[in-house]
Amino acid sequence: MGILKFGGRLLSNMVHKPVTRNYPAEPREYTDRTRGHVEFDPGRCILCNICGKKCPTGSIHMDKAARKLTVDRMLCIQCGYCVDVCPKKCLSMAADYIPPDTEKIIDTYQVPEKPKEEA
């Protein structure tokens, strides 16, 4: 009796399309509210370090003297709190994930010097 059930299932699977996606060939489509990873726009940053102080895991570090911001991707939990507290909105949450890697990823961004306005 079990062989007949299996044979019926086998025949139905041979004529129907697969339920799953062919992942590498067809990339996943993420929804708008997906919290993938933090992106940084260095042109808008004022080096206030509010994001680094409010980060619950301490994954954001700012060096004001060198004008650098580092994000430790392995410590970040994608909570989005740094994005909410940034006054210039230079941080945003991207809707895709960083590909897995065997090495620790630390992103370092150089914040450009702002030209001084003449009055």
Image (tube, rainbow, N blue to C red):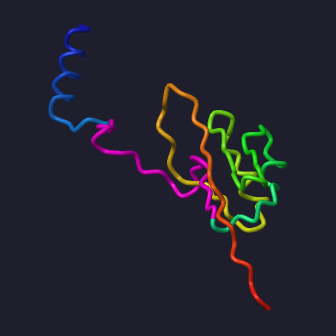
Query: Is 21 positioned to the left or the right of 104 in the image?
Result: left
52 relative to 10 in the view: left or right:
right
The segment highlighted magenta reads 20-42
- Which residue lies at the image location 58% right of the left edge and 55% below the top edge? 33
Vertical placement of residue 76 versus 89, above or below? above
Screen quadrant of the C terminus: bottom right
Chief secondary structure of the magenta portion = loop
Front one among 17 and 38: 38
Please name the residue shown 26% across and 35% down the image.
18
Quadrant in which the N terminus appears: top left
Q: Is residue 95 magenta?
A: no
Nearest the camera: 64 or 80? 64
Q: Is residue 30 left or right of residue 89?
A: left
Q: Position of residue 57 (x, y in %)?
A: 77, 37
Residue 27 forms part of the magenta stretch = yes
Q: Residue at x 23, y 22 (%)?
A: 9
Residue shown at the point (42%, 51%) measured from the top left: 29
